[in-house]
Image (cartoon, helix red, strand yellow):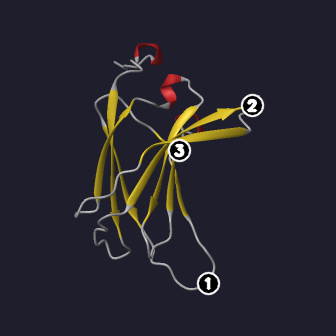
Amino acid sequence: MKSSISHNKLNKHETGFLEIRVMDNRNIPIPNALISIAKISYSGIYNEGAEGITLVEPHTDNNGIVHIELLVLNELMGSNDFYSAKISKEGYYDFYIYYIQIYPNIDSSYDINLTPRTNGVERFMFLFQPKRRSVHDH
């Protein structure tokens, strides 16, 4: 029997958890990395614009981990809002995560590997969390 969750039944005041583990390219934890969590809101007829607000900016612990409680926000809610994260640490290129999904009482976890900076062109790393409607069965 197939079960489904109605987005109408999700309580906008419930919370879930986001865990981000930050490591270098040798999988060694990076303590004290800055994690900036923002809520981004699309606007416009075609969602062609967006603006955001920074919600929290914790640092990773000695094991390179940050654990953040956030209000539920996911694609099942039919919202034009989503969470994003910017991970930064001096000596490394910045890393961005977009479309973070937070579900009630569930940990959403990401393992992020930062790349050491080298002289030359500025680089950025991105991770786009796929939206359910963009995933196709083959």
Residue 5 in the image, given as x and y percentages of width and height: 40, 19
- First reached walking from the N terminus: tag 3 or tag 2: 2
Three-letter residue code for mark 3: Pro
Q: Which mark is residue 130?
A: 3
Residue under numbered circle 1: 120
Residue under numbered circle 2: 44
Instruction: Determine the image quadrant of residue 25.
Output: bottom left
The reply to whether callout 1 and callout 3 are in contact (CB within 8 Å) is no
> Which element type, helix, strand or loop, lies under badge 2?
loop
Residue 89 in the image, given as x and y percentages of width and height: 42, 68
> Which element type, helix, strand or loop, lies under badge 3?
loop
Horizontally, residue 52 falls left or right of residue 22, namely: right
Instruction: Determine the image quadrant of residue 81.
Output: top right
Tally of numbered discs? 3
Above or below 43: residue 62: below
The residue that appears at 56% across and 86% down in the rendered structure is 119
Q: Residues within 10 Å of mark 3 (few under 14, many from 20)?
A: few
Q: Farthest residue to the left: give it.
A: 62
The residue that appears at 50% across and 65% down in the rendered structure is 94
Instruction: Determine the image quadrant of residue 79.
Output: top right
